[in-house]
Amino acid sequence: SSKMHMTRSTRAIILLTAFVLGVIVAVRVPPMAAHDEIYHWMRVVQISEGHLFPERVGEEWGGAVNAASFRFDMWLFERFLELQPLKLADVWSHAGELAAGSAETAVVPFSNTATYSPLAYLPQAAGVFLARSVGANVLIQVLAGRLFNVAAYISMLAPANAATATPISPRRIVAGRP
């Protein structure tokens, strides 16, 4: 009976490929242009500031978040609505301008994501927290959050990848018992 399994080098190549592609996507996709990122950003910022639970903001849910992060999100959102292309120099410049008032907070509603569990946001929120702690501008905070997401993905992929070292019988797979 033949057995299928991946070699250690094959598993390493899978992890390395996932890491490299993840970093490329994290760096190359414009800020807030990843799927729904513009809507989830306020929740990430809220959690990165230690607020795991949303607050009532009028009739909606949301809470106090870093004002520079909120302004950056809205500035990008306006450009997306107007279908304006983003130039890295402009985004970097705007992020730098916002850094001056980075300690200021804004109480804003973001009901579409405010009530989501904080668990899924923890890796990205940790990256944002760390970047903000060292004085990074909002653009670097976005990038740090994305890179922490890549690291979290790789840390979940690695054990699953390692499990493929166990020989698997093709007959057992067909029978539904790998």
Image (cartoon, grey):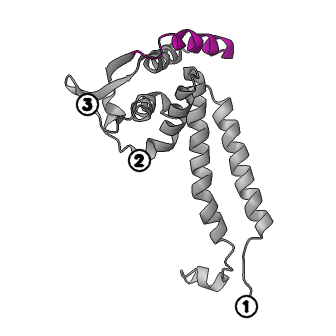
Q: Mark 3 or 1, which is nearer the eye? A: 3
Q: Residue 119 carries which label?
A: 2
Q: Is residue 172 visible?
A: yes
Q: Is residue 84 visible?
A: no
Q: Residues within 10 Å of mark 3 (few under 14, many from 20)?
A: some
Outermost residue to the left = 59
Residue 21 higher or lower than 145, as above or below: below
Residue 95 inside the magenta-drawn segment: yes
Q: Residue at x 55, y 35 (%)?
A: 145
Residue 20 higher or lower than 58, as above or below: below
Q: What amino acid does circle 1 point to? A: Ser
130 vs 28, nearest the viewer? 130
Disc 1 from disc 2: Cα separation: 44 Å
Residue 17 at what x, y percent from top left? 74, 51
Looking at the image, is mark 3 or mark 1 earlier in the sequence?
1
Specify the quadrant of the image occupied by residue 165. bottom right
63 vs 80, nearest the viewer? 63
67 vs 7, nearest the viewer? 67
Q: SS of the residue at dot 3?
A: strand
The magenta stretch spans which residues? 84-104
**Side (left or right) of 152 relative to 169:** left
Look at mark 1 in the image and give the residue it sits on. 1
Q: Residue at x 74, y 52 (%)?
A: 16
Q: What amino acid does circle 2 point to? A: Leu
Quadrant location of the C terminus?
bottom right
Disc 3 from disc 2: Cα separation: 17 Å
**Side (left or right) of 128 relative to 151:** left
Q: What amino acid does circle 3 point to? A: Glu
Disc 3 from disc 1: Cα separation: 60 Å
Q: Residue 92 carries which label?
A: none
Residue 87 at what x, y percent from top left? 66, 14
Q: Which residue is drawn at 63% across and 15% down?
A: 92
